[in-house]
Amino acid sequence: MTFPGAGLDLVAVRGISARGFHGVFEHERREGQTFVVDVGLAVDTRAAALADDLALTVDYGAVAQRVVAVVEGEPVDLVETLAQRVADAVLAVDGVAAVEVTVHKPEAPVGVPFQDVVVTIVRHR
């Protein structure tokens, strides 16, 4: 992740898993599948570290809950759209200057053996 300036740190939550009904095929919308999301947050953690106070930083548990709500929410066709919605939800959190979102779709209907389908985006406030 490229951070937008000095004084920002990385707070990451990896492997957030939720069931969603996203995809272009009818069976994906009907049956759903597991999506796994990684988020990296550009945050200034200095004040929180000095005071040892959660109120002065980003609550990564609350961020993870936002991610799950998006994945479990309104279906979309594209993984790219899902990643953008996750980014929008995370950037709405006070203190997040930028976010890197990686959406994994390991059960994608690719038609050949594969390990994972991954889309990664970076968005700045």
Image: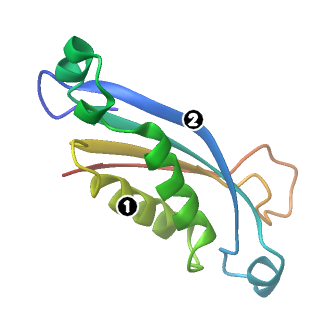
Classify residue 22 as left or right of residue 10.
Answer: right
In front: 49, or 37? 49
In front: 34, or 69? 69
Percent coordinates x, y for residue 114 in the rendering: 81, 47
The residue identified by callout 2 is: 14
Query: Which element carries disc 2, helix, strand or loop?
Result: strand
> Which quadrant would the N terminus be assigned to in this image?
top left
Crowd tier of the residue under label 1, counting other residues whose Cα lies within 10 Å: few below 14, some 14–19, many 20 or above: some
Percent coordinates x, y for residue 72 in the rendering: 62, 69
Visible in this render: residue 119?
yes
Q: Residue at x 42, y 66 (%)?
A: 85
* Number of numbered markers: 2
Percent coordinates x, y for residue 31 in the rendering: 84, 77
Q: Is 25 situated above or below 35?
A: below
Q: Residue at x 21, y 42 (%)?
A: 97
Q: Residue at x 72, y 47 (%)?
A: 116
Classify residue 76 as left or right of residue 120.
Answer: right
Q: Is 119 situated above or below 73?
A: above
Q: Is 116 situated above or below 4?
A: below
Residue farthest left in this picture: 6
Dot placed on the residue nearer the N-terminal end, 1 or 2: 2
User: Label 1 is placed on what type of residue?
Assistant: Ala
Tell me the CA gap for discs 1 and 2: 16 Å
Query: Which element carries disc 1, helix, strand or loop?
Result: helix
Visible in this render: residue 2?
no
Q: Which mark is residue 89?
A: 1
Kindly indicate the quadrant of the structure image that contains residue 12: top left
Classify residue 21 as left or right of residue 2.
Answer: right
